[in-house]
Amino acid sequence: MATFARQTFSAKAYAAFRPSYPPSLFRTVLNYHKLPQPGGTLLDLGCGHGLIARSLRPHFKSVIAIDPSAGMIAQAQQTTTDPEITFRQGGAEDLSFLSDGAVDMAVAGQAAHWFDYGKVWPNLARVVRPGGTVAFWGYKDNVLLGAEQATKIMEEFVYGFGEVAPGIEGMGPYWEQPGRNILRDLLRSVQPPDTDWTEVTRLEHEPGEDGTEEARWLTKKMKLGEVEGYLKTFSCYNGWKEAYPEIRSRADGGDGDILDFMWDRMVDAMPEWKAMGDRWREAEVVNDWGTYILMARRR
């Protein structure tokens, strides 16, 4: 994924504003794995800033975490002190540094929609031991519960093509594809090959709908200022900024960029937010993301 190599991308901001994973998610994947006791090796694919590696380390003897982004690896190394977690730059498409059957469990959080599965499935079949497992999970398209009109405006700006405000093009063309569409479809197009994998299990949740705790694992109350910071980590926003470097945000001393104009519209649509004036970023809203978990066991 090219986004994380862009000059406009901040690994530090990604680590600060991206949502963390709840204990219920880790319970789900560990219960599926059926780890008898802490031991074995975990492989974290697309590890980002190391959140998953650090969270699952107590359940494994060692963790190997890889990511294509040098910036992400640097951020992970700066925030990790455990000597049994090894970070290295690389992608899921090249696991030649691992021996056959070296991995007990392979995971990928918010990364599996970027994989080239023509290479990844054969790689995982080789390095995951018989009886070992894979678990991929991710999230998409947060909705603001109780703020449907604001959510509609947000989606228009984030996925819109053409003009979404006077002289402002929507961010739709700047999502990297096909990865984003694969994620929005909750990875349904990704099928573990029957020749190598069994006990395939999927858990899915569409944003704004009811669901079990296992499937609906990412819901969080946030201040609007935190939602604003989260949206700035979107790859489409970073791509949009590269396309329009002359349009500066108000925070950078400009007249406003696409997110500034989007929030103007969103705040205008919600009387309680608008009544707060310049303090609108302190308003709180519950975010509900669409989520998936895909798990499979090596034959």
Image: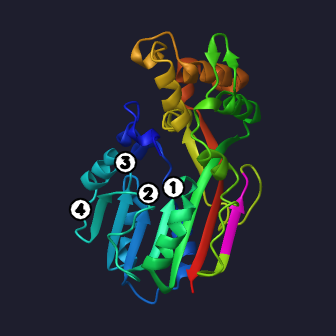
State the residue lying farthest toward the front: 118
Q: How crowded is mark 4: few (under 14 residues within 10 Å), some or many (20 or more)?
A: few
What is the CA distance from the residue labelled 4 to the residue labelled 2?
19 Å
The answer to whether the residue labelled 1 contacts the one labelled 2, judged by CB atoms less than 8 Å apart, is yes
x then y, percent, for residue 29: 55, 74
Residue position marked by numbered label 1 in the rendering: 111
Is 227 placed above or below 93 here? above
Is 16 placed above or below 137 here? above
x then y, percent, for residue 50: 37, 58
The range drawn in magenta is 201-206
**Most prominent secondary structure in the magenta stretch?**
strand
Label 1 is placed on what type of residue?
Ala
Is 48 placed above or below 255 here? below
State the residue lying farthest toward the bottom: 36
Q: Which of marks 4 and 3 is in front?
A: 3
Residue position marked by numbered label 4 in the rendering: 81
Q: How crowded is mark 2: few (under 14 residues within 10 Å), some or many (20 or more)?
A: many
Left or right: where does residue 138 sit relative to residue 71? right
Say whether disc 4 or disc 3 marks the residue closer to the N-terminus.
Answer: 3
The answer to whether residue 275 is visible is no
Residue position marked by numbered label 3 in the rendering: 69
Left or right: where does residue 282 sit relative to residue 178? left
The answer to whether residue 93 is visible is yes
Residue at 28% x, 66% y is: 86
* Quarter containing the C terminus: bottom right
Q: What element carries label 3?
A: loop
The answer to whether the residue labelled 4 contacts the one labelled 2, judged by CB atoms less than 8 Å apart, is no
Residue at 45% x, 61% y is: 93
The answer to whether the residue labelled 1 contacts the one labelled 4, judged by CB atoms less than 8 Å apart, is no
Q: Is mark 1 on a helix, strand or loop?
A: loop
The answer to whether the residue labelled 4 contacts the one labelled 3, judged by CB atoms less than 8 Å apart, is no
Residue position marked by numbered label 2 in the rendering: 46
